[in-house]
Image: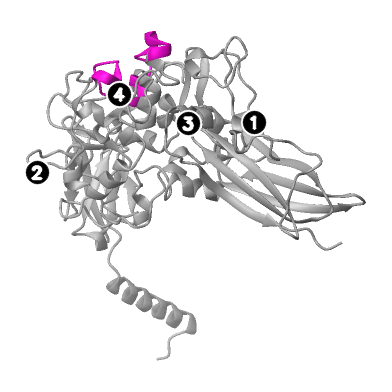
Amino acid sequence: MRLPTGLLLILLLALLAGLILSVLPSTKAALLDGYVRDENGPVASARVRIKGGSLTTRTDAHGRFQFPRRVSGQRVTAWKEGYFIGGSWLSSSPVILLSRLPGEDNADYEWIDPAPNGNAIHNCANCHAEIYREWSRSGHAHSVDGKRFRNLYEGTDWHGKPNIGWGLLTQYPDGAGVCASCHAPTARAYDLRQVRGIAARGVHCDYCHKIEGIADGPIGLSHGRFNLRLLRPSEGQLFFGVLDDVDRGEDTYSPLYRESRYCASCHEGVVFGVHVYSTFSEWQASPAVRQGKQCQDCHMKPTGHMTNMAPGHGGIDRDPSTLANHRFFDGSQAAMLRRAVKASGAFEHRPDSIRARVKVWSEGVGHRLPTGFVDRNLVLVLEGQSSNGQFLSPQSGPRLPDLSGDKLAGQPGRLYARVLRDFDGRSPVPFWLATPDPPPDMRLVPGQIDEMSFDYPVTLKHLRLRVLYRRFWPDVARSKNWPDDEVVVLEQTFSPAPR
C-alpha cells in the first residue's frame, strides 16, 4: 500500500530528527556545572575564568557557573571584589571556595625585599626574575638613591661636595620631609638621609601591590602614601594585581591597577603652593582621555617578549599582551620621546628671502611634553646653511633665551618648558623658593601644533632641525658637575625647492 505523500514526508522528517538527536549530546550533558562558595554559602556574580584563557562567565544567584564540557581537565578560577582569587580543577562538578580579604590594614606589616634571596620565600625576584630586572632599571627603583635627585635634596654635587647650587636641605631645611611620601613610601623616617633597609628600595614591588584604593584626599594636595589606602595582612600574604586568575591563595584582582587614578597621588602635586607635578591633570585634559587611554596603556605596555611571569615557580604560559612591563617606558625614555616628537618644514620663496615655516607637535602622548619634574625641558634648534657650507642666521623668527645655555642662547628656535620664578622675579629657581603664581607653560600640548616662521637669506640651501631633551637647566647641571645627558630626540634636514 502506497502511503500518502504528505505522511511519507512527515515520517522521513521524524526519522531524520531522531538520527540527529541520537548523535548529539543533550544540552545538559554538553555543559559542566560548578559552584563558587565562601564560608557562608553560594557567592553570586563571581567572575569565573579558565585560567590563562579568555573564556569567562559569572555565577548565578546560587553560585553556579557552567562551562562547555570540552574544557574539562583545565584549571578554573573565581574572583569577586573583597575576596582572594580561588581555583579548582575543572572536573565533573568543581567547587571553588573563596576566602575574604582582611578587614583592616596591618600597620605593623614587615615589607618584602624585592631582591632575590633563596632563604626568603616571598622575595619578589625569586619567582619574577624578568619583572624584577625591568623594575630595577626604572625610576621607581631609584626614587631614593637617584644621584641627581639626592644632589638636589642634599645640596651636593655629583662628587658629594656639600653646599653646591640648589639644595632643599640647605635652602629650605623645614621641607626635609616633603619628598618621602612618594620617593620612599614605606619609610618610617621622613628625612631621606635616614632611610634604610627595604624602604631604601624606593617605590618597590610589595608596596605597589598592597594598594587597595585611593583615599579621600584631593589629588595634588594629598601626596603619595597619604592618599593611598593600603591593605597589609596580619597573617599570610596579600597581593593586588591586574590578573584575576592567579589562584595561589594570596592574590586578588583590582581594576584600579589599570587606571590612571592609581598613578595620580605621586604624579600630581602642589608642593609649598607650587604646582610642581602636573602629569595627571595634563592627562585629564588630553585627547587620550576621550580615547579611553590610561597611563598604563603606554607606560606599562607589554614588551611582547615575556610569556611567563614566574617560570619554574608555578607560572603558566600566557598571551604576552597580558603581561605588563615594569620599566614604565616602552623601550626607554629616550625611545618614547623620539616616537612622540614630530616636526615638519616648508618653504616659501620671497623676493629677498626664503621663509621657513616650521611645525612641531607631539604624537601618541597623553600629557604635555616634557612632563614630570617641573624643570625638564625640550629645546628646538634650527641651523641654516648655504650651498658653500656657511651657517646662516635668520632675519626674523623666535630666538632661544639665555635659559637654553651658553651654547644655544640666541640661536633660532623655541624652548618648551615651564620656568619657575621667585618673589623677586628671578628665574629659574627651585620649587621650594618659587612663587605659587603659575608660570607660562610653553610645553608641547597633545593635539596642538606649534607653528613658527623664520626668514632666511635667499642663499639658504639646507635647514637642520633638532629637538633636544634636557632633564635640567644647563647652568644648574654645570654647577652640580652632572655628566652631560642631553638627548637628541629629533633631527631632520629640510631643503627648499630651487627657485
Image disc number at residue 118? 2
User: Is residue 274 at least partly visible in the picture?
Assistant: yes
**Neighbourhood count class around disc 2 (C-alpha, 10 Å): few under 14, some 14–19, many 20 upward:** few
Camera-near label (4 vs 3) is 3
Q: In the image, is 33 to the left or to the right of 171?
A: left
Question: Of callouts 4 and 3, which one flags the residue occurring earlier in the amino acid sequence?
Answer: 4
> Disc 4 marks which residue?
185
In 3D space, how far apart are the residues under numbered discs 1 and 2 (Cα atoms)?
51 Å
Q: Looking at the image, is mark 4 or mark 2 earlier in the sequence? A: 2
* Mark 4 residue element: loop
Number of labels in the image equals 4
Q: Secondary structure at mark 3?
A: helix
The part of the chain drawn in magenta is 170-194
Nearer-N-terminus badge (2/3): 2
Contact check, label 1 and label 4, Cβ < 8 Å: no
Numbered mark located on residue 400 in the image: none
Residue under label 1: 442
> Toward which corner of the image does residue 246 lie, by quadrant?
top left
* Mark with earlier residue (1, 4): 4
The residue carrying mark 3 is: 478
Q: Position of residue 415 (x, y in %)?
A: 63, 34
